[in-house]
Amino acid sequence: WWDRVSPAAKDPITGVTEAFLADTNPHKINLGVGAYRDDEGKPVVLQCVRNAEAKIAGCDFINVGRESNATAVGSKLVEESAKLAYGKDANVVKEGAFAGLQALSGTGACRLFAEFQRRFHPESPIYFPDPTWSNHPNIWRDAQVPVRTFQYYHPVSKGLNFAALMDDIKNAPDASFFLLHPCAHNPTGVDPTVEQWREISYQFKEKSHFPFFDVAYQGFASGDLDMDAQAIRIFLEDGHLIGCAQSFAKNMGLYGHRVGCLSVLCADAKQAVAVKSQLQQIARAMYSNPPIHGLLLVSTILSDPETKALWVKEVKVMANRIQQMRSTLRESLEKLASPLNWEHITNQVGMFCFSGLTADQVDRLVREFHIYLTRDGRMSMAGVTTSNVSYLANAIHEVTRY
Ligand code: LMR
């Protein structure tokens, strides 16, 4: 039956985790996966999550009547997630003019949307920024959606290639789908300014493009959840219909729970009912319902004011720690008298630094220093700690000086 099956290529991100785990060197560092770590390099269970756990412990939702209650928990999660993305007073939320569904984290939300897109716009491709998260093309490809790219990153400035981005938006066929990272772009850490987002939104209107936001790192760019949703709010003000994939894997430290939300803005509440029913049908055939425990945690955190306030603070703490590590890494490289410019380490935002290291230099970091990252040179700054930053700076200096 399976003679024709050859091994699949390793995923560029999860493959790094595997290699890191297999390494026994005590100095090893994992800068691969974009999941938060504390200053000890350990995954963190946020206090708001612990509090939510305590609140739901022994709760009937978990023990009995799962089926009907799952729907209620899902609705709560969707409503609160929509407020987080579109704003707590947004009309679309108040009027119910959106279709929302709990999803298996950001990946699951993207996958649901990709299937939905193919069902109702089978001819339309999706445009991804170049580069984008390495899993985006896989998700839309598996949903049989044609995949294209638009220019985004400027390798020389290590910033945004705004002019080229605008050209590609203008030159794409009218009414194309575009995937946008509203904050903390993965993998580059390069975001448009507010003014640039306004211009992008304006051009989307001119071209009737559909903006689909992948919101995987809300809070990590600025430390403020609302500020990080500014791009979405600009598009909303401009009257676009929008899609959003939201993940709580990073900003609540719930990677393993796979909690997320897909929302699609609609012309009115009636259309939203139809869209939601289609999304539910797609989810039902793929996995039915997501597990309830993580959903309960997130909906408890978002809907209990005290727990939510604690979460908001904890997001800031995580974002600040990463920011601090950016400054320390840059200073350390400058102190080593590295002849290269490292300003981009602090100019870029969010969890990632797109270091500019070549694949060969990355290979040397792995081989000679046991420092693991993806071969495109993306470093997850969450893996940098007070105790490993100078080892890291030395290693980067070594592989970049010859
Ligand atoms: C990443 O880019 O590292 C994260 O989005 C985690 C993942 O699952 O790839």
Image (tube, grey):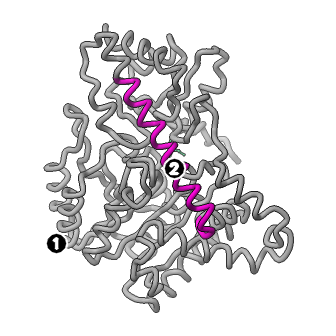
Q: Which stretch did the figure color magenta? A: 302-330
Total numbered labels placed on residues in the image: 2
Q: If the image is split into quadrants, where does the C terminus sit?
A: top left
Amino acid bearing label 2 = Val
The disc placed on residue 315 is 2
Query: Which image quarter: residue 19?
Result: top right
Q: Is the residue marked by circle 2 packed among few (<14), some (14-19), or many (20+) residues within 10 Å? A: many
Q: What residue is drawn where x is 86% and y is 69%?
A: 63
Q: Where is residue 130 in the image (x, y as percent from the top left)?
A: 30, 46
Asked if disc 2 and disc 1 are in contact, CB closer than 8 Å, the reply is no
Q: Is the magenta stretch mostly helix, strand or loop?
A: helix
Query: Which image quarter: residue 65?
Result: bottom right
Q: What residue is drawn where x is 44% and y is 13%?
A: 395
Secondary-structure class at tag 2: helix
Is 312 a magenta residue? Answer: yes
Secondary-structure class at tag 1: helix
2 vs 1, front mark: 2
Amino acid bearing label 1 = Glu
Q: What residue is drawn where x is 72% and y is 74%?
A: 70
Q: Which residue lies furthest to the top in this view?
A: 402
The answer to whether residue 207 is above or below residue 274 is above
The answer to whether residue 191 is above or below residue 82 is above
Q: What residue is drawn where x is 66% and y is 50%?
A: 47
Q: Where is residue 270 in the image (x, y as percent from the top left)?
A: 46, 92
The CA span between labels 2 and 1 is 36 Å
In the picture of the structure, the residue carrying the numbered disc 1 is: 206
Q: Where is residue 320 in the image (x, y as percent from the top left)?
A: 45, 40
| In the foreground, 58 or 27 | 58
Is 324 a magenta residue? Answer: yes
| In the foreground, 285 or 204 | 204
Query: Which image quarter: residue 86?
Result: bottom left
